[in-house]
Amino acid sequence: MTGVEIRQAVLEILERIAPDEDLSDLDDAVAFREQMELDSMDFLDIVMELRKGYRVQIPEEDYHNLNTMQSTVDYLTPKMKDVPVAG
Amino acid sequence: MSRWLADCCACRSATSGSGYHSFRAIARVNVDDGPHWEKSTVHYDTVIIGAGMSGLSAGVRLAYYEKNVCILERHTTIGGLNSFYRLRKRNYDVGLHAVTNYAEPGSKGGPLSKLLRQLRMKWEDFDLRPQLHSSIAFPDCTLRFTNDFAYLLEQVAMAFPKQIDGFNRLVRTIADHDALNLDKRQATSARQVLSEHISDPLLIDMLFCPLMFYGSATPRDMDFSQFVIMFKSIFHEGFGRPFDGIRMILKKLVRHFKALGGHLKLRAGVSEIVQRGGKAKAVVLDDGTEITTDNVLSSAGAAETMRLVDPTRPMVRPKAGDISFVESISVLDCEPASLGHHDTIVFYNDADSFHYERPNEPVDLRSGIICSPNNFDYSRPLEDGRMRITALAEPDYWIDLPEEEYQQRKMEWNDRIIESALKHIPDFRSHVIDTDVFSPRTIRRFTGHLNGCVYGAPEKFANGQTPVGNLYLCGTDQGFLGIVGAMLSGITIANRYLLK
Ligand SMILES: Cc1cc2nc3c(=O)[nH]c(=O)nc-3n(C[C@H](O)[C@H](O)[C@H](O)COP(=O)(O)OP(=O)(O)OC[C@H]3O[C@@H](n4cnc5c(N)ncnc54)[C@H](O)[C@@H]3O)c2cc1C
C-alpha cells in the first residue's frame, strides 16, 4: 500500500469508530484528539482495526506514533508497504 | 485483596493434589472417555456466562475482533435482569423503567455515545426518546428534574436557597472526580462528602433517593464513585426509553453478535467452571456437556461465579447483596396523562427520613418509584397505559413463601403498594385491565442472582479480576450498574483482558 492508500484506510477506520465525526476537513498535521472526540478506548480500536483489516501489529510503545494522520501514515508506510489494498 | 482470601485458599487446596476437587478432576478424565459424557468439539477463546446486557456487549466486542466466542445462558431467553416477556397477549419489560445516561442522537462524549461507538451500533438502534419530567417527592418538599441539568439547579435554589452554594460546590466536586478509574478505587462515603457541602439532611436524602433506587448495592450510604456515576447518569444526562421497550435493543445486540460470528446458546446453564492450577480450563453445562476455553467471562455475580469454581465449599466471601424489590405493573385502559399524570418517574418517600435498606416487613411501603413508560416524548401513543410501582422488599420472605401462598401474597401487597403510592399520583385503579407483579423470588428464578438481588454484591470488583487467572467478572459485580453501565462493563473488561 502507498501512503495515499494507507491514509484512506485509516480514514475508513476512523469513520467506523466515530461515525458522528465530520472528517472531511481533517488536518493531517494536527493531533486527532484536537480535532475529534477520541478517548483511549477509541485509540485502542484504531490499533485493533489495523490488526484485523491489515494484519499489522503495533506494539504499545509505538502508540504515540498514532498522534496525527501524518505521523500515523509515516509510521505505517514501511510496515504496510507489502500489504495489498483491501477489497 | 482480603475479600478473596477464602476463595484463594479454596483454590489452592483444590489443586494441591489431595482433596475432593482434584479427585474429581481425575474422575473426569475417565468419564470423558465414557459413553455418557458429551464433550463439545469446539474450543473457544472466551466463554461468556450470561446473555444479559453485559455479556452480550462483551460478546459483540470479542466477535467483532474475530475471537471465537460463545455466550451461555441458562434461561430460555436473553436479557437477564433486563429481559422481556409476553403475558396474556401483552408485551412486558422485566426491568426497564428508563435508560439512564440519555444523550441526543449524534452527541459526542458521554457513556452512551462511547458504548455505541464501541459496539459499532447506531443511535437509531437504540431509538431512545427523552423523558418528559420527573420528580423527587418528599413530605412538604418536591424537586423536579428533566434532562436539562440547569432545571434541577433552579429547583434546588428555589426549594433550598441556603444550600445552593454548597450544592454548586458539590457539583464541582463531582465534575472533578474520576469515577471510572478501575485501579485506584478508594472507598469513600458519599454521605461524608455530601455533608461537607450540604447541611440540610432533607436535601441530602432527596438527592440520595433516586440515585440509590437506581444504582446502590449498599444500604444507607454509597461509595462516592458510585454516587458520582449515578449523579451524572440521572441528573446530568437523564432518562430515555425506546418506543418498543428493551426488546428492540436486545434483539439488535443479538443479531449483531451472531452476524459477527458469535455463538449463543440458550438453556445452557453453567454448573461448574473446571480449573486446574489456578486457571479455568472448561465449563460444564447443566446437561453435562463440557466446553473447553482459554478464558471465562462471567456476568453471574461474584459469589455466584465462585460457587461455580468450587461448588463443594460454601463460599464465605464474597458476599452476595440483599437489596431487592417488588414491582407492581398495572395495565390501564387509558394513558396516565389522561388521568392528569404527566411525570415520567416519581421517586417518593413519605417517612421523616429516607431508608434505603433491606426492610423488616415483606415490602417497605414508605418509599418507592412510580414509572409511567407512556410519559416519554413519543410521537404516537404506546399500545396501552402502564403504571409501574417499585418498592424495597425483604428477599427471604418472598423466596421462602410456599407456592400456594405466594400468588395471594403478591396480589395483597400489590394493592398495598398502589394504595401507598396514591399520595403522589391520581387514583388509576378503576382503569386497570391487567396486573403483573414480580418479587425477589422472580428475579432469583430468572437470573440466578442470590437473594433476588438487583444491584449485586455490596463490594465491587472494579478491575474484573478473580483469584482464578483467566476468569473475569463483568456486569453487576464488576460495578457498573444499570443498562448502560452493564453494557460498558462488558465492553471494558473485554477490552482489557480478552482482546489481546
Ligand atoms: C426490576 C428492575 C428494574 C430495573 N430498572 C432499570 C432501569 O430502569 N434502568 C436501568 O438502567 N437499569 C435498570 N435495572 C438494572 C439493570 O437491569 C441491570 O443493572 C442490568 O441489566 C444488569 O446486567 P448484567 O449483564 O450485569 O446482569 P444480568 O442481567 O443479571 O445478566 C446475567 C445473566 O447471567 C445468566 N446466568 C446466571 N448464572 C448463570 C449460569 N450459571 N449459567 C448460565 N447463565 C447464567 C442469567 O440468567 C442472566 O441472564 C433494573 C433491574 C431490575 C431487576
Image (cartoon, rainbow, N blue to C red):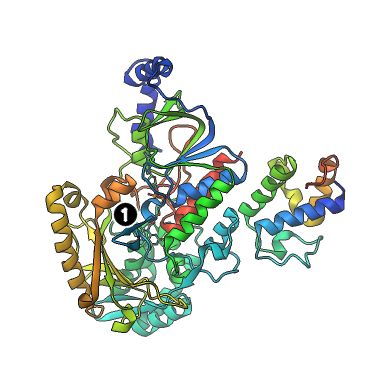
Provide the chain ID for the residue under circle 1.
B
Residue A70 picture quarter: bottom right
- Vertical placement of residue B126 versus A60, above or below: below
Q: Secondary structure at mark 1?
A: loop
Residue B212 picture quarter: bottom left
Looking at the image, which residue is at 38% across and 55% down?
B83
> Circle 1 is placed at which residue position?
B218
Query: Residue A7 placed where, x, y %?
Result: 81, 54
Does the closest atom of ligand 1 sit within 8 Å of the Cβ of label 1? Answer: no
Q: Is residue A39 shown left or right of residue B296?
A: right
Circle 1 Cα neighbour tier, 10 Å, few/some/many (<14 / 14–19 / ≥20): many
Query: Residue B392 placed where, x, y %?
Result: 24, 60
Q: Is residue B415 shown left or right of residue B93?
A: left
- Vertical placement of residue B149 versus B409, above or below: below
Q: Amino acid at mark 1?
A: Thr
Query: Residue B287 placed where, x, y %?
Result: 36, 31
Looking at the image, which residue is at 36% across and 81% down?
B162
- Vertical placement of residue A45 versus B374, above or below: above
- Vertical placement of residue A5 versus B32, above or below: below
Between B317 and A26, the one nearer to me in the picture: A26
> Can the viewer see residue B184?
no
- Image quarter where the N terminus of chain B lies is top left
